[in-house]
Image (cartoon, rainbow, N blue to C red):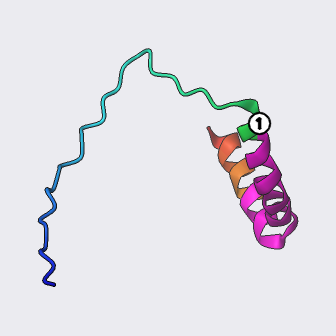
Amino acid sequence: MKTEKKEVEQVPPAEPRQTEDTQTVIPDFEIEAMARVLLPALRAFYASPEGQAAFEEWKRQQENT
């Protein structure tokens, strides 16, 4: 049995539209889940010498602005 190839129609992506009343609502349980995943990694980074140096650089930049 021979299988025919179907051509897929290419649809260009839609242009994003921005309106003043556009608002994204993220449920609290989603924010808490993200925090549980990200917080340990953030703490580990800022406990490292590299993270501490990055934080000090950020503080210097804040003083200059």
Q: Position of residue 27 (x, y in %)?
A: 69, 30
- Which image quadrant for residue 52? bottom right
Q: Is residue 61 left or right of residue 53?
A: left
Between 55 and 16, the one lying in front of the other is 16
Instruction: Determine whether the residue tagged by mark 1 lies in a helix, strand or loop.
Output: helix
Mark 1, Cα crowd under 10 Å, few <14 / some 14-19 / many 20+, is few
Q: Main secondary structure of the magenta part?
A: helix
- Which image quadrant for residue 19? top left
Does residue 14 sit above or below 21 in this rendering?
below
In the picture of the structure, the residue carrying the numbered disc 1 is: 29
- The region drawn magenta spans 32-55
Q: Position of residue 60 (x, y in %)?
A: 71, 50
Is 35 magenta? The answer is yes
Image quadrant where one finds the C terminus: top right
Is 36 magenta? The answer is yes
Q: Residue at x 15, y 56 (%)?
A: 10
- Which image quadrant for residue 3? bottom left
Q: Residue at x 64, y 42 (%)?
A: 64
